Amino acid sequence: HEDQKKLDSEEDDDTEELKAARQSLGLSADGFAKWLKATDGSQVRKWERGATTIPGPVRVLVKAALESRSVRRYFGLSLSDDPTSKSE
């Protein structure tokens, strides 16, 4: 039972992190869904509430976007602390 509690706690953390990531990238739920090729914003909100499991590929893509400016640039995304200059 302890293992299940740990898994539930980790999933709660993931849902909060997903919403924080979406907001950091400046995307609405619908915009996030479009970027991830998800059904629509309601699907994103289900992930954020923990109503449905966040798919592994979504986790990987979001993590890559948060950690790599090159990935963000590829998708036309940015974080508030990204340089605005195109030259690096």
Image (cartoon, grey):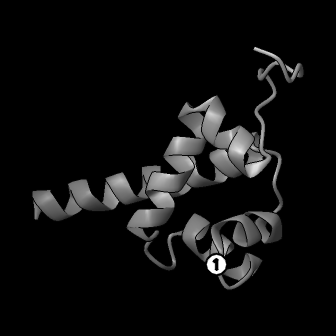
Residue 71 position by quadrant: top right
Q: Which residue is mark 1?
A: 38
Residue 5: x %, y % from top left = 23, 59
Give 2 or 62, whichever is nearer the viewer: 62
Residue 53: x %, y % from top left = 43, 74
Residue in the image at 34% along x and 54% along y:
9
Residue 49: x %, y % from top left = 58, 69
Residue 4 position by quadrant: bottom left
Residue extending farthest to the front is 87
Q: Amino acid at mark 1?
A: Ala
Q: Is residue 22 left or right of residue 58?
A: right
Give 45 or 34, whichever is nearer the viewer: 34
Q: Is residue 56 left or right of residue 40?
A: left
Q: Quadrant of the C terminus?
A: top right
Q: Is residue 18 left or right of residue 40?
A: left
Disc 1: CA contacts within 10 A as few (<14), some (14-19) or many (>=20) = some
Give 7 or 72, whichever is nearer the viewer: 72
